[in-house]
Amino acid sequence: MEPMELTTTVNRLSNGVWAIDQGMVRCFLIVGNEKALLLDTGAGECDLLGLIRDITPLPVTVVQTHGDGDHTANSQAFPEIYAHPAEFPVLTRFRPDWRPRLLPVAEGDVFDLGGRTLEVIEAPGHTPGSICLLDRDSRILFSGDTVSYGPVFLFGAHRDIRSFRKTLDKLQAMGGYDTVYPCHNTCPVSPAVIEDLKAAVDGALDGTIAPEPFGDMPMPDGAKPACYRHGD
């Protein structure tokens, strides 16, 4: 995969949470009293570890929300990375030179950062092993590419729109958060956006929403991007 040259900025979003933003995508650094957690490793190569050290000297645990190439550009800077086992083939497919040791996570696993805990929520659909992280005390859901205000890509061989629809129901029903921090588009967003995503998926599945062309970007597996739009 060819490296992408992107401008990288760091923005403090809330207490102990920073977005490392590369325009098209962001990863997150979440800092507790004893440890920090890096969620995803960016779309373009940068001195990610140096940016982290400008924020905190604490030991860093790295977790992947999923394995698409725009979330894994700086993975090689870290000796080990946590991900869902269903995502291991996606990670190595997009990064054939993958070197970090992969460590498994599952529903309900908790990362304790000291005064801050993050719970793993399995969220298949966008990819087989997509996950979210839930900060129950701060009532924040770090949603990866599963929930966002804007496009959620569901074309390509490793997507499953019906699993995605079930995941949306699950995230809506479980509650426990007031704010969503997505990896793409507007951040933060309200959990209310889940209802619009469900309506768009339902319209795509039952044919009540007509597909619209979605740009000329190259897509994996030769897929032809289309947009199913609900609301404004």
Image (cartoon, grey):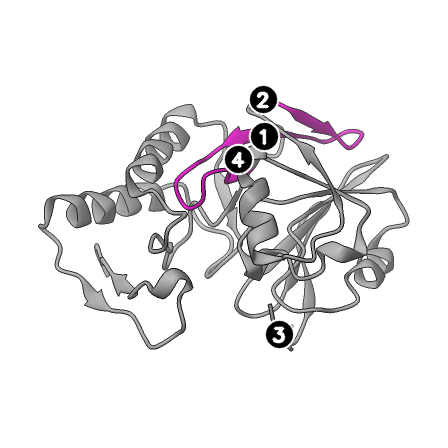
Tag 2 near tag 4, CB within 8 Å: no
Which residue type does callout 1 highlight?
Val
Tag 1 near tag 4, CB within 8 Å: no
Q: Earlier in the sequence, mark 3 or mark 2?
A: 3
For this rendering, which residue is in front, 207 or 17?
207
**Front tag of 3 and 4:** 4
Kindly indicate the quadrant of the structure image that contains residue 81: top right
Tag 1 near tag 2, CB within 8 Å: yes
Q: Which residue is mark 2?
A: 108
For this rendering, which residue is in front, 51 or 92?
92
**Front tag of 3 and 1:** 3
Q: Which residue is mark 4?
A: 86
Q: Is residue 10 left or right of 224 when viewed as pictured?
A: right
- Per the rendered image, the range of residues in magenta is 109-132
**Front tag of 3 and 2:** 3
In the rendered structure, find residue 4 and report the number of the disc placed on it.
Answer: 3
